[in-house]
Image (cartoon, coloured by chain):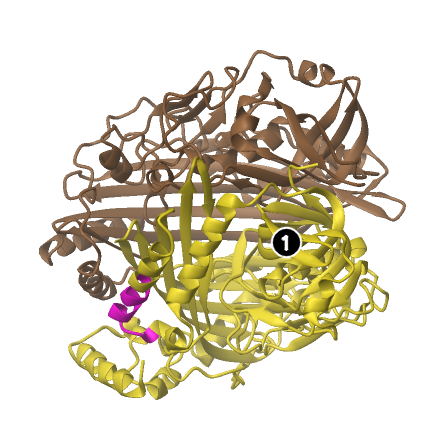
Chain colours: A yellow, B brown
């Protein structure tokens, strides 16, 4: 969308607001980008100003405790689903509420309310405080507004585009995917965007407001021929500007997904057993997310259940490996100005030259470990308490020419596109699915094979990295991590990475 | 907001939607309270208690469908959201099947979804159950020195529904759960085991001591696990593993996926898709079932549907819309919460129990794998391929001989289902998707060299 169109649209919206919209939904349609920034969290602040937050926190700590916070949130979501060539459903979602947490050492009390009012949050504060059994006195609380340094600024965020433009994107993707091949028998496209305002007040004096925009589009074409079926996947989005779909062609993405579905029709079965594996850049970072990322999170480390407990300063990966968690990566799904405890987002080098340097920490687990939060305290919504989570996690660029990483592999597996994965952080056993793979034969990528799950043990597998390309890519358009029932958007990334051996879980021996 | 005024408000909003141009409208209001205590090393590590109240409203106009959901129940906000949603609905595509349910679901006999004993549980009770489970875990074995945590919680929920044709309907339910995750340590090796029970009635919940004990057995069984060489052998899935596998398989039975060519079961009605030992049922009317309900998310009647009868695919599972598209009766599988549209999902979905003793399923295996746990994603219900990380025990001459981890099992789903050569008798519901122990004649185990 051009600046001019945006302003024209702004005029349309101004008239809508003049027609008497209630304030509660005004965040949807800020008149201009400037107004959008001025108005961040205003509706939350109307109820939860510094004074009322002080009083709620005071109530939360009335029975003792080390720490308390108030977290208020409202989101406006637009969802559009296109299936079988038709706009199947359209949704507006407006969930809103606030929660109070009380912490004392390793103990946490939490309560929330779907209604944002002073009285409902005082009630929540009382419920949350029941976890604390001491009667120690709390010093008066005085929160002060902090200005957050945003990692990047969106002038014209995509979620503020006119609805008609969003429908247009879906229709273009649908037509492009169907046009690829007559064997494409169905296409489902899901579009979701959201504007999320948060307000955080903490007993250590922080009071912040933030607004986060997020776009997620997925396109799943299915192909069928001769009794065989396959599906492709393309995703688009991130924390992006409205001109995103001008810079990146939705048609190209949809066509790639359709081609993938068709390719998988003819792909052979995946091999079974350990062999050299090369993983493609970008979304391949699922691998580091599962293999080391979760074990770096401070809750498991503090409880002593993570396999990385006590391994600070020791070798946990090949010396080629640097692992970074960067909550400020431009446009990243895991990026924000601050985490959900009000700690500014930061870049943390977790592993340097294969040696464990830092865990990923929220306030509570950091305090218990005698460390400081690394800005990784995140939550799914106001209905959840914060726990240590990754933001955008990646293996940093290495020095190898990506093409050279296949050299010398007589027989191996190339993971062109990964699916999801999971890990047991106590044992370190992890898996990640491959949506699309290829044989590597005599140093060259050859026949396509269908997906398979790859499995390994974190520490063993990370030590088997024997080559890292110079082609780092951070995936901005997909990545939702689930832990303890909480789903949060994350970024993952890596350059091309070569492993001397990983077990490929195909059916073909 | 008190519940009754929320219900009245939901009614007013639906009527306002109808006055503002929706030919049909439907409200789905959810309220409830969730409480959970988590213990670790005898100390309460987390206590949380909260009430939710959320509203979903579907509007239909000229066979176009729009949806809004919110937890903001201020009337001015709702009025505005309704108007915006109606405007958005104009941009959707008309579809013949976009029509809301006109007939009231026949009242079922008492499904026993709510237990007053669960409602009455106090936080101290939850803490006591969790403490007993953890103490029992520590008492089992010296190698259990810590737990990840032990959790005990309850949910008390109520659903309220109405639409243009159907007056207020409501049902209430309770759930109680208790889980333990002890960590077993041997030398430098640590393995966790987890056991959870979940029930609608407190009296049906496994005793805390049992939960601690079963979890410890699982943790200890994993110590010393190693991969086995890649091989094709018979594979037995424990009841729990088979339940997780079935959960992944559900999407293949969704009529929407079938209609849109996204299921490997497309076009297979009336055909043998599994061995005659296999019967698969979805039953939304099971007494005390975790997935039971008096009506589905569209106000439709819930049913007992035999999807696979002794190996033959008899029915797909439907929402109201897919039933209309395929011109068959709906099955009551349009499930939702207030913040989602009705989508085809499992009520109580299970492989029915068979006739082979669970021990016999293992004893008949000369050399094979007994799978006790599955991890990550594995079932591709579009292509019909299966590959998943598993752990368990190696079987030699019918006996469990050594723990196995770091391996996968793989196969083609159509061959796997036809190759199920034994179904156990041990069907138990600790989740709304469940299975007895099952044995696959042969799968590929991928492991070490």
Name the image quarter holding residue B423: top right
Q: Describe residue A275's horizontal placement relative to residue A189 as left or right.
A: right
Identity of the residue drawn at 50% across and 37% down: B384
The N terminus of chain B lies in quadrant: bottom left
From the top left corner, tell me how far across and down residue B186 is, in percent.
Answer: 87, 42
Pick the front one: A304 or A97: A304
From which residue to which does the magenta span run? A160-170
Q: Does residue B123 appear in this view?
A: yes
> Is residue A169 part of the magenta span, yes or no?
yes
Pick the front one: A195 or B373: B373
From the top left corner, tell me how far across and down residue A508 is, in percent.
Answer: 66, 37
Q: Describe residue A117's horizontal placement relative to residue A314 as left or right.
A: left
From the top left corner, tell me how far across and down residue A478 is, in percent.
Answer: 50, 62
Q: Does residue A428 appear in this view?
A: no
Q: Is residue B45 above or below residue A17?
A: above
Q: Is residue A131 above or below residue B315?
A: below
Pick the front one: B62 or B76: B62
Main SS class of the magenta portion in the image: helix
Q: Describe residue A254's horizontal placement relative to residue B364 as left or right.
A: left
Identity of the residue drawn at 79% across and 39% down: B227
> Is residue A94 part of the magenta span, yes or no?
no
Instruction: Pinpoint the chain carrying mark 1.
Output: A
Could you tell me which secondary element the residue under label 1 belongs to? strand
Q: Is residue B204 above or below residue A250?
A: above
Pick the front one: B233 or A310: B233
Q: Residues within 10 Å of mark 1 (few under 14, many from 20)?
A: some
Name the image quarter holding residue B78: bottom left
Name the image quarter holding residue B281: top left
Identity of the residue drawn at 78% across and 71% down: A357
Q: Describe residue B356's horizontal placement relative to residue B141 as left or right.
A: left
Residue sitting farthest toward the top: B355
Check disc 1 and report the residue beneath it. A446
């Amino acid at each position: 969308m051009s600046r001019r169109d945006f302003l024209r649209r702004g005029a349309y919206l101004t008239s809508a607001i003049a027609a008497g919209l209630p304030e509660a939904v005004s965040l949807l349609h800020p008149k201009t980008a400037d107004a959008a920034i001025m108005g961040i969290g205003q509706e939350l602040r109307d109820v939860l100003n510094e004074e009322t937050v002080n009083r709620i926190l005071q109530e939360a700590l009335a029975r003792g405790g080390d720490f308390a916070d108030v977290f208020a949130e409202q989101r406006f979501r637009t969802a559009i689903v296109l299936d079988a060539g038709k706009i199947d459903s359209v949704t507006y979602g407006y969930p809103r509420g606030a929660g109070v947490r009380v912490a004392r050492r390793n103990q946490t009390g939490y309560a929330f309310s779907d209604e944002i009012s002073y009285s409902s949050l005082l009630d929540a504060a009382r419920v949350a405080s029941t976890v604390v059994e001491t009667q120690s006195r709390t010093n008066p609380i005085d929160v002060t507004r902090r200005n957050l340094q945003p990692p990047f600024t969106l002038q014209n965020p995509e979620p503020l585009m006119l609805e008609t433009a969003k429908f247009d994107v879906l229709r273009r993707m649908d037509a492009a995917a169907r046009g690829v091949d007559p064997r494409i028998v169905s296409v489902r496209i899901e579009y979701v965007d959201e504007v999320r305002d948060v307000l955080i007040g903490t007993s250590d004096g922080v009071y912040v407001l933030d607004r986060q925009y997020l776009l997620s589009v997925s396109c799943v074409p299915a192909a069928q021929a001769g009794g065989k079926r396959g599906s492709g996947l393309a995703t688009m989005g991130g924390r992006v500007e409205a001109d995103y779909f001008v810079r990146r062609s939705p048609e190209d993405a949809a066509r790639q997904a359709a081609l993938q579905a068709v390719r998988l029709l003819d792909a052979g079965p995946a091999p079974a057993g350990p062999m050299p594996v090369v993983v493609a850049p970008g979304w391949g970072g699922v691998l580091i997310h599962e293999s080391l990322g979760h074990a770096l999170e401070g809750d498991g480390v503090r409880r002593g259940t993570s396999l990385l407990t006590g391994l600070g300063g020791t070798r946990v990966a090949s010396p080629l490996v640097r692992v970074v968690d960067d909550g400020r990566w431009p446009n990243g799904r895991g990026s924000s100005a601050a985490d959900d405890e009000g700690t500014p987002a930061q870049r943390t080098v977790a592993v340097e030259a294969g040696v464990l340097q830092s865990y990923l920490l929220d306030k509570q687990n950091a305090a218990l470990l005698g460390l400081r939060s690394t800005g990784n305290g995140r939550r799914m919504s106001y209905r959840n308490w914060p726990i240590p989570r990754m933001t955008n996690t990646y293996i940093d660029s290495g020095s190898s020419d990506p093409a050279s990483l296949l050299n010398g592999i007589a027989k191996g597996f190339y993971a062109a596109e990964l699916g999801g994965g999971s890990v047991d952080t106590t044992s370190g056993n992890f898996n990640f699915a491959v949506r699309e793979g290829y044989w590597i034969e005599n140093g060259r990528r050859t026949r396509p094979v269908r997906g398979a799950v790859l499995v390994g043990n974190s520490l063993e597998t990370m030590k088997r990295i024997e080559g890292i390309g110079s082609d780092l890519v951070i995936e901005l358009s997909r990545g939702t991590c689930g832990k303890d029932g909480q789903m949060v958007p994350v970024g993952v990334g890596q350059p091309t990475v070569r492993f001397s051996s990983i077990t490929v879980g195909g059916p073909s021996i | 907001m008190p519940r009754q005024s929320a219900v009245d408000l939901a009614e007013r909003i639906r009527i306002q939607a109808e006055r503002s141009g929706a030919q049909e409208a439907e409200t789905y209001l959810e309220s409830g309270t969730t409480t959970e205590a988590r213990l670790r090393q005898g100390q309460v590590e987390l206590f949380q208690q909260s009430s939710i109240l959320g509203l979903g409203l579907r509007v239909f106009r000229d066979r176009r469908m729009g949806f809004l959901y919110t937890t903001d129940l201020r009337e001015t906000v709702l009025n505005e959201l309704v108007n915006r949603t109606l405007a958005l609905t104009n941009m959707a595509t008309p579809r013949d099947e976009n029509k809301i349910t006109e007939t009231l679901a026949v009242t079922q006999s008492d499904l026993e979804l709510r237990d007053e004993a669960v409602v009455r549980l106090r936080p101290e009770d939850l803490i006591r159950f969790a403490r007993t489970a953890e103490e029992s875990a520590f008492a089992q074995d010296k190698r259990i020195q810590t737990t990840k945590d032990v959790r005990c919680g309850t949910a008390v929920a109520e659903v309220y529904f109405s639409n243009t044709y159907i007056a207020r309907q409501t049902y209430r339910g309770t759930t109680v759960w208790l889980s333990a995750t002890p960590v077993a340590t041997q030398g430098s090796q640590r393995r966790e085991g987890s056991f959870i029970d979940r029930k609608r009635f407190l009296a049906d919940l496994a005793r805390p001591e049992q939960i601690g004990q079963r979890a410890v057995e699982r943790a200890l069984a994993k110590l010393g696990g190693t991969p086995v060489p890649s091989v094709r052998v018979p594979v037995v899935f424990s009841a729990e593993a088979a339940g997780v596998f079935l959960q992944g398989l559900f999407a293949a039975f969704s009529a929407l996926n079938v209609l849109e060519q996204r299921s490997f079961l497309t076009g297979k009605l009336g055909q043998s898709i599994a061995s005659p030992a296999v019967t698969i049922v979805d039953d939304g009317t099971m007494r005390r079932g975790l997935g039971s309900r008096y009506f589905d998310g569209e106000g439709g009647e819930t049913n007992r549907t035999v999807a696979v009868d002794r190996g033959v695919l008899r029915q797909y599972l439907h929402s109201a819309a897919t039933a209309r598209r395929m011109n068959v009766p709906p099955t009551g599988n349009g499930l939702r919460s207030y913040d989602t549209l009705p989508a085809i999902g499992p009520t109580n979905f299970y492989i029915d129990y068979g006739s082979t003793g669970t021990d016999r399923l293992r004893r008949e295996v000369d050399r094979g794998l007994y799978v006790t746990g599955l991890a990550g994603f594995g079932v591709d219900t579009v292509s019909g391929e299966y590959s998943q990380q598993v752990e368990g025990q190696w079987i030699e001459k019918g006996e469990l001989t050594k723990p196995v981890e770091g391996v996968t099992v793989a196969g083609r789903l159509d061959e796997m289902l036809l190759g199920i050569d034994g179904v156990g008798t041990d069907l138990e519901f600790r989740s709304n998707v469940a299975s007895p122990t099952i044995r696959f004649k042969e799968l590929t185990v991928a492991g070490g060299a």
